[in-house]
Image (cartoon, grey):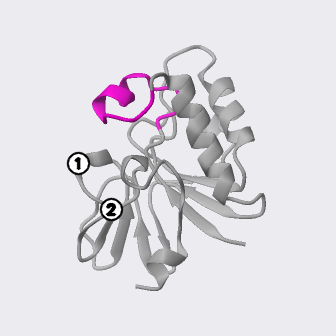
Amino acid sequence: MNTWLISDTHFYHENIIKYCNRPFNTVTAMNFAMIENWNGVVDKDDTVYHLGDFALGRSCDYVKRVNAILDLLNGKKYLIKGNHDRKVAQLNFEDVFNGLVLDGFMLSHVPKETELVNIHGHVHNNMPFHYMVNKYNVSVDVIGFTPINFNKFQRR
């Protein structure tokens, strides 16, 4: 079993394609590609920590649409709540956190000042994957729209 990290998928968010210059023509193509990439590396028994901004939407069927995506994704999914995450109590995550220390690493949505190595999202493609000695950005925009294995950080 493996542990995976990812952030800022923004499922259903059409404007994120333009804002972050994502290589997709439609939100449907973006959603499909991220589901395929996720399931291409994550097994059913793996654990995934999503570091916030899982989906975006204002429609009355938001919970239904987000849970439909969650049900398609492999693994046990935990959410570190991001600034765009809504109605999280109604979503099919195993658990939801505001932040979490995992094996000596600080997992958060926004970058944190901490003595621990901070793995976060929020900054999309405005910061590279490793941009300071103790900061890693796992926004999909810099990790190829695919979850990254937590072992990559444990070996550093």
Q: Is residue 123 above or below residue 71?
A: below
Query: Percent from the top left, x then y, of residue 15?
Result: 37, 23
The answer to whether one can see residue 8 in this image is: yes
Q: Which mark is residue 129?
A: 2
Element under disc 1: helix
Element under disc 2: loop
Residue 69 vs residue 98: left or right?
right
Q: Which mark is residue 126?
A: 1
Q: Quadrant of residue 2?
A: bottom right
Q: Which mark is residue 145?
A: none
Indicate the quadrant containing the C terminus: top left, top right, bottom left or bottom right. Answer: bottom left
> Disc 1 residue type?
Asn
The answer to whether one can see residue 123 in this image is: no
Number of other residues with Cα within 10 Å of mark 2, as a class: few under 14, some 14 to 19, many 20 or more: many
Q: Is residue 34 above or below residue 105?
A: above
Residue 30 vs residue 118: left or right?
right
> Disc 2 residue type?
Phe
91 or 69, which lies in front? 69
Query: Percent from the top left, x then y, of residue 118?
Result: 34, 69
State which region is magenta.
Answer: 10-24
**Residue 23, magenta (yes or no):** yes
Residue plotted at (49% across, 18% down): 58
Q: Is residue 75 above or below residue 67?
A: below
Query: Percent from the top left, x then y, of residue 136?
Result: 33, 66
**Residue 87, magenta (yes or no):** no
Q: Is residue 128 above or below residue 22?
A: below
Q: Quadrant of residue 76?
A: bottom right
Residue plotted at (55% across, 28% down): 29
